[in-house]
Every structure is written in structure tokens, then in C-alpha cells.
Amino acid sequence: MGLGGALGDRPAYWHAAWADIRAHPLGGSGPGSFAAVWLERRTSASATLNAHNLYLETLAELGPLGLVALLAALAAPLAVLRRRLPTTIAAAAGAYVAFLLHAGLDWDWQMPAVSVAGLICGWCVLAARRQERATSPRFSRSVDVAFACSALLALGAGAASIGNHAAASAARSERIGDTATAIRLARIAIAWQPWSSEPHRLLGLAYLDGGANRAARREFERAVALDPTDVAAWLGLVRTGDPAERARALRALARRDPLL
């Protein structure tokens, strides 16, 4: 199998991300926007939520400043490495580097079991070097700064993971018809990810399954207000909106996905 076959659809995802970067070179197209960008720019019927490259997707969605902030936080454990390392710390550093490299080829960041494990390896490196405070005050301060950056990143990842887990569980409950559980979990996801349209969309679907069309419509409206590129939320408005809103939703869908 050649390199192209091994990469699957990734080159197409990366091409769409680069096109989005050129279209929004400074501020990016917004957090979580790649799924909609792919629908607008795709050349096949395949669907994806991620560009399968953490760094490229961050640049596309958050712009150069977002990418710099991400790299600064992720590089913190590497910045304090020295030539001679204890065996266990060298192993943790190697695993952390592998995590960083693989994040450029897949959507590891969306999988808490992978991302948290990788960040823990980075923490181990920082914690070990933090014990060398007496060697150099300047080195000690750099370790403290790096440790704080890594801790903030891990806390952010943990909060996002809680929201992601609640949203995924809500979607699973909605699929099997457990409306009450889906509503409860979607509300938890909203509390942890107030910036995201997905929990509102999931809550709308759960309300719709329960026959609460007006409440469902309200959540779909909130979802598209947060993310006008959320195709699934527009589809929800097609199902629940009045004639004028349905027409608006259909126009938005036609703009977002030319293959529809």
C-alpha cells in the first residue's frame, strides 16, 4: 500500500484546512468549525469532524495566535529537557514526543484516554525537573512556568473531555430512545461547553423525540446562533421551524453543503 492509501482521506482534509487558512489567515474560522468547512469544500461524500491534524486544524480554526498558544503549552515539557535523563523520565519523554507527533496525523485530542495519557507523560517530565530547583534559580523559574502552562492545558483538556463525554453519552441515549437521560446529559454538556452548538443540538433532538417540538426548535435556534455552520442544527430547524424558518434553513443548507 502506498503512502496515499495509508493516509486515507487525510490529504483531502488537510487541503480543505489549508484553503480555510488562506480564507481566514488571522483569526481563523472559529472553534469547531472544520466539520462545516469540510462540507463546503469536500470533493467526495465522506464526512468528518476533524482535519486529522491537531496543529493544522488549530491554525485553521483559531488562527496564528491560537496555534502559538497551543504550541507554547505543549512544548513546555520539552523546553526543560536536558541531555542526561533517568530511564523512567526518558521513557515518559519519548512517549510524550510520540503523542505530539501522532497528533499531527489523527484526532487524538478528541480521545481523552489518549490525550490525558500523553499529557501525564509530559507532566512526569516536568515534575521530575521541578525537583532540581536548587541547581539554578533561573532554571527553576522556567520549570515553574512550564509546569503552570502544562497544568492549565491539562485542566482545559479535562473540562473539554467532561463536556465531550456528556455530549457523546447524550447522543447515544438519544439513539436508543432514552429521552430523559439524553436531555439530562445534554444539559450537563451545555454547562461544560457553553460555547458549543452541539449540546444544544443534541438537546433539541431529545426534545423532538419526546414530542416537545417548541422546546426542540428553541434549542436548534440556539445551536445555529452559536454556530451558523452547524448543518445538523439547520436540519433540525427544517423539521421544527415555521415555513419562513424552514425556507431560511434550506437556503443555509444549500450554501453549506453543495453535495446535498
Image (cartoon, helix red, strand yellow):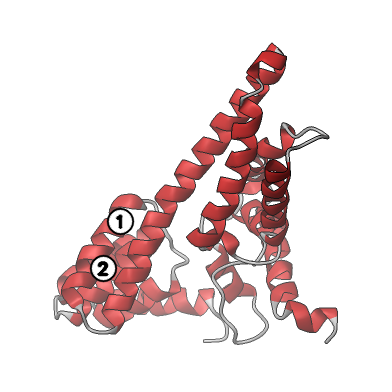
- Residue at image x 46%, y 44%? 156
- Nearest to N terminus: mark 1 or mark 2: 1
Q: Which of 112 and 123 is in front in this view?
A: 123
Q: Give amino acid for label 2.
A: Leu
Residues tagged 1 and 2 counted as in contact (Cβ below 8 A): yes
Circle 1 sits in a helix, a strand or a loop, which is it? helix
Q: Is residue 164 above or below residue 63?
A: below
- In the image, which disc is placed on residue 203? 2
Instruction: Determine the image quadrant of residue 145.
Output: top right
- Residue at image x 83%, y 78%? 3
Give percent across and percent down for residue 205.
27, 75
Judge left or right: residue 128 versus residue 215. right
Instruction: Determine the image quadrant of residue 125.
Output: top right
- Residue at image x 40%, y 49%? 159
Judge left or right: residue 210 versus residue 111. left
Q: Is residue 260 above or below residue 105?
A: below
Q: Which of 148 and 258 is in front in this view?
A: 148
Instruction: Determine the image quadrant of residue 248.
Output: bottom left
Q: How many labels does the image show?
A: 2
Q: Can residue 30 be seen in this view?
A: no
Quarter of the figure with the N terminus: bottom right
Judge left or right: residue 255 versus residue 68. left
- In the image, which disc is placed on residue 190? 1
Give percent across and percent down for residue 253.
46, 77
Circle 2 sits in a helix, a strand or a loop, which is it? helix
- Residue at image x 62%, y 53%? 58
- In the image, which disc is placed on residue 248? none
How far apart are labels 1 and 2 at the CA level?
Answer: 9 Å
Give percent across and percent down for residue 49.
54, 70
Q: Give amino acid for label 1.
A: Ile
Question: Few, some or many C-alpha atoms within 10 Å of disc 2 (few <14, some 14-19, many ≥20)?
Answer: many
Q: In this view, does 105 lie above or below 253?
A: above
